[in-house]
């Protein structure tokens, strides 16, 4: 593993480099957009003996992640789908990219959940000023 990937593993969601390659990073206005492409490793099982892959297609999924350097960050994952010879359906790997019910990366959603819980916990606690400062 090269140093660059080791550094990126500190920044991006855990395990992302197991299934994806980092391919592009751009700025769209004030937003950082980073694109990953799923590695070409079809999820073949024992029932797929010596398969011939006849089609590949991509489906992009965009996820909101922690801001980088103060800029909103979107991660686009180009998911692969494979079609085997003689089959109508496409194969895809089961990789959960977002927190259920959101378009947020898991850790980012958990951060908001904790932040919201802390705020609601403290909402009733505030300090009254003894007198009007005016």
Image: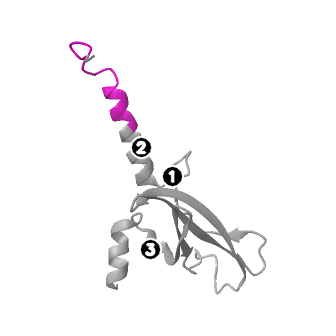
Q: Is residue 93 visible?
A: no
- Tell me the residue that label 2 is attached to: 112
Label 1–label 2 contact, CB within 8 A: yes
Q: Nearer the viewer, residue 36 or 24?
A: 24
Mark 3 surroundings: few (<14), some (14-19) or many (≥20) residues within 10 A: few
User: Which marked residue is nearer to the observer: mark 3 or mark 2?
Assistant: 2
Residue ID at (41%, 68%):
15
Q: Quadrant of the N terminus?
A: bottom left
Residue 18 got which mark? 3
Can you give x and y, in whole percent of width and height, for residue 78 in the image?
60, 70
Can you give x and y, in whole percent of width and height, for residue 94 in the image?
56, 63
Residue 104 got which mark? 1
| Residue 18 vertical placement versus 109 (above, below) | below
Disc 2 element: helix
Residue ID at (41%, 43%):
112
- Label 3 or label 2, whichever comes before in sequence order: 3
Residue 50 got which mark? none
Q: Quadrant of the C terminus?
A: top left
- Label 1 or label 2, whichever comes before in sequence order: 1
């Amino acid at each position: 593993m090269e140093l660059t990937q080791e550094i990126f593993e500190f920044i991006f969601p855990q395990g992302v480099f197991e299934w994806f390659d980092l391919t592009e990073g751009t700025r769209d206005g004030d937003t950082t957009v980073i694109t990953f492409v799923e590695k070409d490793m079809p999820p073949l099982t024992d029932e797929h003996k010596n398969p011939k892959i006849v089609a590949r297609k991509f489906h992009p999924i965009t996820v909101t992640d922690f801001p980088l350097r103060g800029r909103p960050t979107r991660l686009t994952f180009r998911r692969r789908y494979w079609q085997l010879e003689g089959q109508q359906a496409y194969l895809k790997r089961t990789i959960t990219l977002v927190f259920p019910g959101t378009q947020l990366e898991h850790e980012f959603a958990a951060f908001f959940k904790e932040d919201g819980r802390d705020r609601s916990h403290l909402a009733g606690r505030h300090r009254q000023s003894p007198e009007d400062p005016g």
